[in-house]
């Protein structure tokens, strides 16, 4: 029994913590080798891949100049997706989870709780997860950012009343530096490996999943006893966060031609930027 | 003392003026368009559901001038662009434009009082520049960059990058997937359905 509850907690946490498609979990890196295999696996009725025709200039029909010359085909970032069948299933699962559970919860919640209070709650959770950002900055030798995180924690915990207000941002314009261990691994040059979608947690990758496990242990909430309380707090945090993003996921789905591919690409691009920052 | 301050200011102006005058065109162009959109959004005479359509129409009008949809389409398709015949390219541009406008204008109309800061310009090549902006919301700061290209003396947007996610790269990955299995006509068909023009 004792063993089961932490496991249960991990699972729940994973599920809940990445409902947002915008994916705050882990990391990116582009150089996944030969995408051809995955490409084939991905396409449901696979046929021949398009011949990558190099001669863009062959068609001099307009004044557009040629793309490859400048800034290139703004480098394509790709990720291997050998778990496609699993991922696609989880994608549908999370989709339903959002529309049937998280969205109604968050809507009801935000109808009752004013925005200012929800913002304070968000600040509070940001403050107590300082260890994740502090350690990640330190591991990346971002000493100044690590110092800022430490200062923010001390200042916001006191002047910001237990972290309810982001006083460090208001008074000194010292902002949160969003770092996690997945990004840290990425900064060491470690690539994503493969794309993975977790139930409840959403899009991730092999590397970012490893980072996430580390983040889990750096999150003080997970040391709360009993486990049920910790789970409850985590769920509450997710609902609160979701309340700020109602509509984002819907818009994303609406604008996409293939939402699954769109989200996968957005995840990789977004994490790449986070690693570079 | 006053004299000193006066000459100091003059010196600063002299130092700064040429730089900003030189660097400002792409940024000012984007800012001009964004300001026009904001004017529409904040126009109190256009309040209410019934006026939403007019609002959208006005924003669409700005977007026609702001974006270079041909460049945007071409870069989205990348190497697949040459697989399309000229008429197919034209149709692609139109469909893609209508899908983008449909999706993003709906989204924009719901914004009201977010503050936008125009940070800086970042030259990418001889003809292209990235204009970096930040939208300040109560919850977070969202970085948005506009990539613009100069053609015939005018700067137009060909890519928008939100929190590191490039619009054209994101669509490219989706189109590439479709074009791996289908002909250009097949892709156009998918787009016609999406745009409601099947």
Image: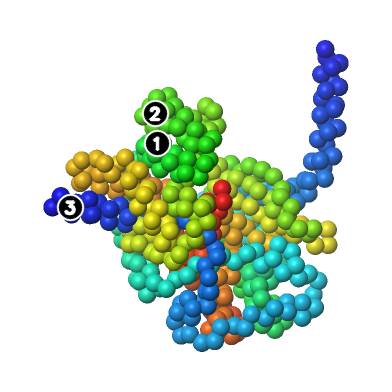
Specify the quadrant of the image occupied by residue A154.
top left
Is A237 on the left or on the right of A182, as rendered?
left
* Nearer to the camera, A119 or B192: A119
On the question of residue B49 being in view, the answer is no
Residue A37 seen anywhere in this rendered image of the structure: yes
Which mark is in front, 1 or 3?
Answer: 3
Give the alpha-carbon distance from disc 1 to disc 3, as whole Å. Answer: 29 Å
Distance between the alpha carbons at the discs numbered 1 and 2: 8 Å
Disc 3 target residue: A3
**Residue lying farthest to the top in this orientation:** B1
Q: Residue at x 85, y 27 (%)?
A: B11
In front: B38, or A175? A175
Q: Tell which circle, 3 or 2, labels the residue nearer the N-terminal end.
A: 3
Query: Which chain letter matches label 3?
Result: A
Instruction: Give the percent coordinates (x, y) of residue A50.
Output: 59, 83
To which residue does mark 1 refer?
A: A127
Q: Position of residue A65 (x, y in %)?
A: 78, 69
Q: Answer yes or no: do the residues labelled 1 and 2 have beta carbons within 8 Å?
A: yes
* Residue B26 to residue A145: above or below: below
Specify whether disc 1 shares its chain with disc 2.
yes
Q: How is the image coloured?
A: rainbow
Assign a secondary structure to mark 3.
loop
Element type at marker 2? Answer: helix
Q: Is residue B179 left or right of residue B74?
A: left
The residue positioned 34% from the left and 48% from the top of the image is: A216
The kind of secondary structure element at disc 1 is helix
Q: Give the numbered dot on residue A228.
A: none
Quarter of the image for the C terminus of chain B: give it: bottom right
Where is the N terminus of chain B found, in terms of image quarters? top right
Q: Choose the circle earlier in sequence order: 1 or 2.
A: 1
Instruction: Name the residue carrying label 2.
Output: A157
Which of the pair A32/A92 is nearer the observer? Answer: A32
């Amino acid at each position: 029994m004792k063993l089961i509850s932490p496991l249960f907690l991990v699972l729940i946490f994973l599920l809940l913590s990445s409902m947002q498609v915008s994916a705050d979990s882990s990391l990116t890196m582009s150089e996944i080798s030969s995408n051809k295999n995955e490409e084939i696996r991905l396409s449901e009725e696979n046929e021949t891949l398009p011949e990558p025709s190099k001669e863009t200039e062959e068609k001099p029909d307009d004044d557009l100049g040629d793309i490859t010359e400048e800034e290139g085909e703004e480098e394509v970032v790709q990720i291997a997706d050998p778990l496609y069948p699993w991922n696609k299933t989880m994608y549908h699962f999370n989709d339903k989870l959002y529309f049937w559970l998280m969205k109604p919860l968050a809507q009801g919640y935000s109808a009752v709780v004013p925005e200012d209070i929800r913002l304070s709650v968000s600040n509070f959770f940001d403050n107590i997860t300082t260890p994740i950002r502090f350690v990640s900055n330190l591991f990346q030798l971002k000493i100044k950012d690590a110092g800022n995180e430490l200062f923010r924690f001390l200042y916001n915990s006191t002047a910001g009343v237990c972290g309810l207000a982001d006083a460090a941002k208001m008074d000194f314009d010292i902002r949160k530096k969003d770092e996690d261990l997945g990004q840290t691994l990425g900064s060491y040059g470690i690539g994503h490996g493969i794309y993975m979608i977790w139930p409840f947690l959403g899009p991730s990758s092999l590397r970012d999943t490893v980072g996430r496990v580390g983040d889990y242990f750096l999150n003080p909430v997970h040391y709360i006893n009993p486990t049920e309380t910790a789970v409850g707090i985590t769920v509450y945090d997710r609902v609160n966060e979701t309340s700020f993003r109602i509509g984002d996921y819907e818009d994303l789905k609406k604008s996409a031609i293939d939402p699954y591919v769109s989200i996968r690409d957005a995840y990789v691009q977004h994490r790449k930027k986070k690693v570079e920052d | 003392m006053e004299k000193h301050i006066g000459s100091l200011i003059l010196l600063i102006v002299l130092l700064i003026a040429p730089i900003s005058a030189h660097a400002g065109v792409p940024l000012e162009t984007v800012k001009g368009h964004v300001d026009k959109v904001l004017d529409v959004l904040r126009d109190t005479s256009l309040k209410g559901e019934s006026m939403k359509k007019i609002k959208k129409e006005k924003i669409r009008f700005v977007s026609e001038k702001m974006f270079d949809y041909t460049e945007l389409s071409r870069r989205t398709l990348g190497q697949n662009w040459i697989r399309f015949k000229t008429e197919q390219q034209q149709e692609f541009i139109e469909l893609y434009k209508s899908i983008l406008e449909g999706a993003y204008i709906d989204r924009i109309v719901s914004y009201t009082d977010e503050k936008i800061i125009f940070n800086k310009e970042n030259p990418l090549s001889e003809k292209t520049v990235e204009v970096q902006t930040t939208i300040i919301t109560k919850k977070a700061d969202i970085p948005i960059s506009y990539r613009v290209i100069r053609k015939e003396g005018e700067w137009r947007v060909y890519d928008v990058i939100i929190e590191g996610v490039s619009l054209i790269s994101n669509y490219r990955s989706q189109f590439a997937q479709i074009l791996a299995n289908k002909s250009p006509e097949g892709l156009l068909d998918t787009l016609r359905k999406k745009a409601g023009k099947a």
